Every structure is written in structure tokens, then in C-alpha cells.
Image: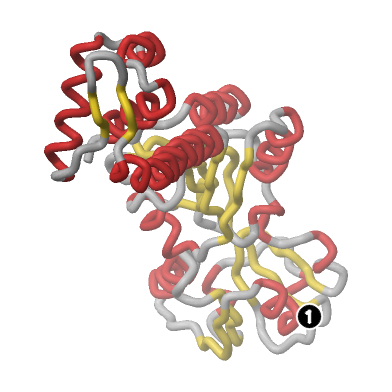
């Protein structure tokens, strides 16, 4: 049943005048008549009794009228809800982010944007690194903030917020803490405490060890940096981590030692090339582009 026919029926039931309903709905009298006849044919019922002098709502019409009004009101409520949802969605930005985002300039950039654009709802979804790109590609988020070592994947555009690099983290009671620099080969007899393979840091470390002709003795691998640092602080082993991923308050009993021939990573915001972004989402991406327009900032 076409909803416009119901609207015409409701109006005619109130006016009982084809001319008046025609004026109310901005359609011709013949269109009013056609819609009513079509509705009656569809229902197999006479909704109005017509005479040369008046139009009267039939008994079937009286039964149908309250239901027709409810259907029309529900339709109006549905349209309002859809419009409200569209308006709200237009002001929402979903970003999949690294669990350690608060350590980086990206977090400052996002919070500044939120402070200056209170009408926009920015939602950060903490996501394990191995799942971030998948969530972006599947359209579950609008943007992503992650760490990359290689080239940007095809179909994505990146804004580089800063660079980071591996360093060695050891207890201050460990003799290695006195060194000004370390080679990977200096670590071959140490116990390794690492972030696990769900992160994108595990394999590069394994590769660096293998390139120096040894396999690391990994006594623990996990997802949480604080747990790893607590173990390092207690001199249970050493860890190789990205410098900027470590909160400064964890370095009281831990020494960060630069790593010779370290590997560099890029911290990036990513977006899909082929996606219809809202105006607010486009504004946010332009804000990031302008903010980090130099592309790669000073590593220190």
C-alpha cells in the first residue's frame, strides 16, 4: 500500500470535500479521486459514500481511519528517526587506534580537535595492531592510527604524525644499562621479554636477531607494555621496544639504551581512498594534513 494514498484517505476523511483535500495536499481533484479509488480497489472495500451533494465516510472507512492515522504517524516518526540518525552520523568520526596512542602526538592532535569542535563526536576504538587495517578496510571505522614499517598499503592514504625507533630497555641494575649504545649482537645471551605476535613489533625484532645470527631466548611475550616493563624493572630480562611507546613514569628503575642499526617506524593516520566521507570527516582529515604538513617530524 502506498503511503500517499493513506495520507489522501486521512485528509478526505477529515474534510469530506475533494476540493479541500486537493488544496491541502497540493494535488488535483482528479488525483485525489484516483488515489481513493485505487485504495478502495486494493482493499476491496468502499471507504466513502458519494452523492451529488456530499461525501460521507463509510462504516469500513470509520474502522480503517484510526489505523491509517497510526500507520501515517509511525511513518513520520520513522522518517524523523532516520533524519536524526543521518544528522548524528554526519558528525561522528570513528578511529581505530593503537592501545598506546596516549604516548604520541596523535593523541594531542585528536584531543585538540575535539576541544575545538564540540559538535563532532570523535570515538576512539582501541584495537590490537594486527586488526587495525582490517577494521579500516571493512569500513568498521572511518580512519585508523597505527604504526607501519613498510610502504602504505594500496588503496590507503596516510598522514605521518611522527617517527619512532627501537631501543633496548634494561633494569638499572643490569650491566648493560651502563652502555651508551648497544648492538643487537650484545643481546644474544640475554633473556628477552617482548610484546607478542599480535603486535607488529614482534617480527621485526626476531628478524634483527636472526640477521645477527642468533635466536632470542624469549622468556615472556604478552600484550601489555606495563607488564613487560615491570618484569624488566625486576631484572628478569631485557626488552626491545619502540622508544615513544614507553610512558616516562615507567623509567625510574629502567634504562633506555640506544640501539645501533635500529629500525625505524612511522606513526600514521590512514584513510581509504575510495570512501564517501562526510563533510566533518573531510574536515578532520584536512586538519591532520595541515597539522602534520611537514610529513615527518623530528624524531626527538
**Residue 29 image point, x, y percent:** 24, 11
Query: Residue drawn 70% across and 36% down?
Result: 114
Which quarter of the rendering shows the N terminus?
Answer: top left
Q: Is residue 11 left or right of residue 154?
A: right
Q: Residues within 10 Å of mark 1 (few under 14, many from 20)?
A: many
Q: Is residue 207 above or below residue 146?
A: below
Q: How is the image coloured?
A: secondary structure
Query: Residue drawn 73% across and 68% down?
Result: 179
**Residue 291 image point, x, y percent:** 62, 26
Q: Which residue is mark 1?
A: 233
Query: Could you tell me which secondary element the residue under label 1 belongs to?
Result: helix
The quarter holding residue 24 reads: top left
Query: Residue drawn 59% across and 41% down?
Result: 162
**Residue 198 image point, x, y percent:** 46, 72
- Furthest residue in direction right, as rendered: 252
The quarter holding residue 211 reads: bottom left
Q: Is residue 236 above or below residue 266?
A: below
**Residue 99 image point, x, y percent:** 61, 62
185 or 203, nearer to the observer? 203
Q: Is residue 1 above or below residue 167?
A: above
Asked whether the viewer can see residue 294, the reply is no
Query: Residue drawn 58% across and 38% down?
Result: 161
Amino acid at each position: 500500500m502506498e503511503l500517499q494514498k493513506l495520507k489522501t484517505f486521512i485528509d478526505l476523511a477529515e474534510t469530506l470535500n475533494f476540493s479541500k483535500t486537493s488544496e491541502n495536499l497540493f494535488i488535483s481533484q482528479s488525483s485525489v479521486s484516483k488515489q481513493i479509488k485505487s485504495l478502495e480497489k486494493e482493499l476491496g472495500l468502499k471507504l466513502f459514500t458519494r452523492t451529488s451533494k456530499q461525501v460521507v465516510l463509510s462504516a469500513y472507512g470509520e474502522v480503517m481511519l484510526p489505523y491509517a492515522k497510526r500507520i501515517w504517524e509511525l511513518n513520520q516518526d520513522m522518517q524523523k528517526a532516520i533524519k536524526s540518525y543521518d544528522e548524528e552520523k554526519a558528525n561522528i568520526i570513528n578511529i581505530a587506534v593503537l592501545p598506546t596512542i596516549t604516548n604520541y602526538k596523535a593523541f594531542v592532535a585528536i584531543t585538540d580537535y575535539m576541544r575545538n569542535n564540540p559538535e563532532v563526536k570523535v570515538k576512539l576504538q582501541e584495537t590490537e595492531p594486527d586488526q587495525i587495517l582490517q577494521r579500516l578496510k571493512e569500513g568498521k571505522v572511518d580512519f585508523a592510527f597505527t604504526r607501519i614499517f613498510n610502504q602504505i598499503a594500496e588503496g590507503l592514504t596516510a598522514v605521518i604524525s611522527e617517527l619512532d625507533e627501537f631501543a633496548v630497555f634494561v633494569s638499572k641494575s643490569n650491566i648493560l644499562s651502563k652502555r651508551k649504545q648497544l648492538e643487537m649482537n650484545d643481546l644474544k645471551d640475554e633473556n628477552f621479554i617482548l610484546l607478542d605476535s599480535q603486535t607488529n613489533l614482534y617480527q621485526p625484532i626476531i628478524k634483527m636477531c636472526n640477521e645477527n645470527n642468533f635466536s632470542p631466548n624469549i622468556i615472556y611475550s604478552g600484550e601489555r607494555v606495563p607488564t613487560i616493563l615491570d618484569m624488566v624493572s625486576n631484572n628478569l630480562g631485557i626488552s626491545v621496544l619502540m622508544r615513544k611507546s614507553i610512558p616516562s613514569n615507567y623509567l625510574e628503575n629502567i634504562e633506555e639504551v640506544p640501539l645501533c642499526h635500529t629500525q625505524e617506524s612511522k606513526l600514521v593516520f590512514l584513510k581509504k581512498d575510495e570512501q564517501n566521507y562526510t563533510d566533518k570527516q573531510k574536515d578532520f582529515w584536512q586538519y591532520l594534513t595541515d597539522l602534520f604538513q611537514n610529513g615527518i617530524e623530528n624524531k626527538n
